[in-house]
Image (cartoon, coloured by chain):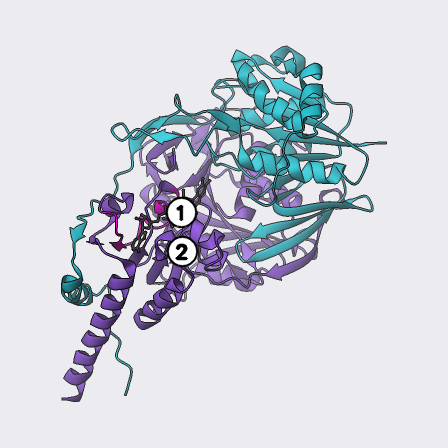
Chain colours: A cyan, B purple
Amino acid sequence: MALEIVVMIKQVPDSQEVEIDPVTKTLNRMKARNVLNVADDNALEAALSIKDKVDAHITIVSMGPPMADEAILECMGKGADRGILLTDRAFAGADTYPTGLTLAAAISKLDHFDMIFAGEETSDSSTGHVGPGVAEFLGIEQITYTQSVRFEDGYVIGERELEDGVEIVKAKPPVLITVRLGSNIPRRQTLRKKIDALRKGVESWTLQNLGIPPEWVGFKGSPTVVRSMKTIKEKERSAKRITIEEIGQMVKELSDSGVLKMEVKEQ
Amino acid sequence: MTGLINAVPTDKPDEYRNVFVFLETRKGSVVKSSLEMIGIGREIADKVGEKLVCVIIGNHLEPMAEEAAKYGCDKVLGAESPDLEDFKTMPYAHYAAEFISEEKPNIFLIAATHDGRDLASRIAVKSRTGVTADCTVIDIDPKERILLANRPVYGESTLAEILCKNHRPQMATARPGVFKVPDRVDGKNCEMDIRKVKVDPDLIRKEIIGFRPKEEFDITGADIVVSGGIGLGKKEGFSMLQELAEELGGVVGASRPAVDVGWIERDHQVGQTGRVVRPKLYIAAGISGKAQHIVGMKLSDVIIAINTDPDAEIVKYSDYFINDDVYNAIPAILKEIKKLKGEKVEEITT
Ligand SMILES: Cc1cc2nc3c(=O)[nH]c(=O)nc-3n(C[C@H](O)[C@H](O)[C@H](O)COP(=O)(O)OP(=O)(O)OC[C@H]3O[C@@H](n4cnc5c(N)ncnc54)[C@H](O)[C@@H]3O)c2cc1C
């Protein structure tokens, strides 16, 4: 039986194009193109490299507005077999709790799954909390922040990047895996797969398909609310112009103020 | 298992009292970022006159619990078992959630390390509450006892204040390196409640089969960072920076492209996809100052920029700007430092 792999992805504003308005200091999302979240692309690559070796079937699941089907088609163009977009006005404004719940509800509607992949976090929210949330809703174990994943003798082996080293973890499916940004080089789409993807299309699921109440999802289902947004005041810096001749004076200033410690070793 | 279930508001928020912090452990000691949680947790608990409770899960907990107590908590609540020796998400989340349902804390803080984030939202879902990620400013409304969890958003330009008004506990993960480690004081009073537990075998579904300690060079603790970018033009430029860094007792940093072209190893990279440094002095030599680099160094106390381009973006982030070639400026700084040290030597010897 083919290994059933789910990859959770999100379409996000392109962080290279996102401009921060110099006056309001908020994100100017209007200008940015929407792209596949880069860590999710790494997650898909990790899943595809398993599919390269064993018989596997990959389903992409994403929650987002209708235009997010582009990102799903891109994943299918790289080799995913099926794409499902969870799209409904009721899903809007969700924090990590109902986002995880919505994704988990959709995944639980699939016949079967062995592995769920996700990026370590998204570039637009950077919480890293959604993947583990999904694992909790589904009652499965997880291997987060992996820099490499392999499937061997019926076990998933993931190398987790931690602050002080790399932990190697072994788990039996079903398991959720989150993948480090930049941990692999995602493959490109092929023309044939792109055409196939367009022919298959992306399935669109609404709240009705999930069978959970409307007050559980989106803004209504979110325990947290954003109360305010404040510009972070950058430290004012004087950019004092220094010529080569004035460097001696600068060094002296820094030494006097204790920034530079002129420790003199015993001669 | 939690199952597919919604978050539920608490109808009796008054029943929820005290502040929990999670203690992450490594090789028999509590990690620094968890001590930082004791610091901020203590502050918050004191503001509302509540207790600070440290939650610790693992094996051989007593020495670690004793150690944590020295940083100032009122109680350590532990679940101990040989099965909990290694970090395993499901049993760890299970015991943390059990402690929550038993003790009903108002607030639960966890350091936003990889293991901390791995665990936090699972505990939140189990407790059917919310969690705010990666906070850098944490406070409490003293009257309502509402946690004010602030996190940077939009490329660190904006601070969003996020509340979890109706659900308990109010949970947050907090960015490591932001909050202070409290002073360590011997002989503080602290209640110890370490329980030997028998872990349900169904919760043990992963196994740690190996660990490779990081051999990387760590630039994050240095007081002085001398960084180079593409403006150095060649690999040898980094030898020059190394000499200056050594003279100053600092380390060498780099922009990503300088790493990408192979002039220096990746563990020296400063920025969004590298390290975040916060030294007393940061020297940016031949670095243009793109946003992804700036986020990694803007918290430095003093910044010196060296750039041939008078309009480079780095200029506005600098305290001192040397509008000259790096190969003129760096040797001049080195010379002046040696000169000043020479004068100090004379002062001592005469
Ligand atoms: C997703 C993402 C993540 C990224 N993460 C990082 C990151 O973590 N860290 C990082 O640094 N970058 C990162 N970048 C890259 C970043 O956008 C910039 O490209 C990079 O910081 C520029 O490096 P640089 O300043 O060395 O090079 P350049 O931008 O090429 O600047 C070179 C500078 O040197 C000056 N110069 C030239 N010759 C001399 C000379 N002889 N003397 C003095 N000055 C001279 C020039 O005027 C110029 O200002 C990231 C980009 C992306 C898209």
Taking the image as shown, residue A60 lies to the left or right of residue A26, namely: right
Taking the image as shown, residue B162 lies to the left or right of residue B209, namely: left
Report the residue marked by disc 2. Answer: B254
The amino acid at mark 2 is Ala
- Ligand 1 under 8 Å from disc 2 Cβ: yes
Q: Is residue B92 positioned above or below A12 on the image?
A: below
Taking the image as shown, residue B202 lies to the left or right of residue B286, namely: right
Label 1 crowd (10 A; few <14 / some 14-19 / many >=20): many
Q: Quadrant of the C terminus of chain A?
A: bottom left
The verdict on residue B295 being magenta is yes
- Per the model, the C-alpha gap separating discs 2 and 1 is 35 Å
The verdict on residue B316 being magenta is no
Taking the image as shown, residue B347 lies to the left or right of residue A30, namely: left
The answer to whether any part of residue A10 appears in the image is: yes
The amino acid at mark 1 is Gly
Residue drawn at the location 39% of the way across and 67% of the way down: B239
Q: Quadrant of the N terminus of chain A?
A: top right
Question: Residue B266, position in %: x, y?
Answer: 49, 56
Q: Which mark is residue B41?
A: 1
Instruction: Tell me the element at label 1.
Output: helix
Instruction: Tell me the element at label 2.
Output: strand
Q: Is residue B14 positioned above or below B119 on the image?
A: above
Over which residues does the magenta segment extend?
B292-309
Which chain letter matches label 2? B
Question: Residue B32, position in %: x, y?
Answer: 45, 57
Of B222 and B284, the residue lying toward us: B284
